[in-house]
Image (tube, rainbow, N blue to C red):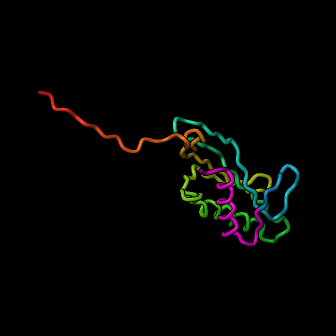
Amino acid sequence: MIELLDIRKSCNTLLKTNFPTIPVKSQDIEKGFLRPSFTTIFDEVKNVTLESLIETSLKVYVYYFPELNTDDYYLHLDDVKYKLPLIFGNKLAVNDRFLDVIEPTVNVVDGVIVFEFDMFFYQDKPLSAKEIEAQLMQDLEFKFKKRK
């Protein structure tokens, strides 16, 4: 079963692999943040339980807080803005699945790069202990009598 932690790990692994010199932090951006660094945040997380499936949708935000005192500040911003959609592509590998990256966009807000995209996927609903304990039918045999 795919959990939010699995999606976060996949996002952060992509960032660490493609930007090895920039730390990926789990930080409360309301209280301040380390520069330079990436932070991944989820919003609008919705799980709908169907008959035997769970429908999950969420919005993923990747924030990049650049170093402010560099001579090539705007070139660096442009480089990161260009690379983020390319490294995420249109599928994100999470566990043994590839989840769609829907409508990715990149914006700069107050000097911070905000890369955002939506995700929507289905997964099997986990079985309850009662369902696991239930004895399932193995074989069913039919014997038919011929009518005269």
Relative to 67, does residue 2 appear above or below in the rendering? above
Relative to 30, does residue 91 appear above or below in the rendering? below
From which residue to which does the magenta span run?
Answer: 1-24
Percent x, y for residue 144? Answer: 22, 34
Which residue is rendered at x = 79% and y = 60% of the image? 25
**In magenta segment, residue 53:** no
Q: Nearer the viewer, residue 10 or 84?
A: 10
Q: Is residue 12 left or right of residue 73?
A: left
Q: Is residue 98 left or right of residue 31?
A: left
Percent x, y for residue 62? Answer: 71, 55
Which residue is rendered at x = 57% and y = 60% of the image? 89
Which residue is rendered at x = 55% and y = 59% of the image? 96
Q: Nearer the viewer, residue 136 or 76?
A: 136
Q: Nearer the viewer, residue 10 or 60?
A: 10
The residue at the far top in this view is 148
Which residue is rendered at x = 77% and y = 66% of the image? 23
The residue at the far left in this view is 148
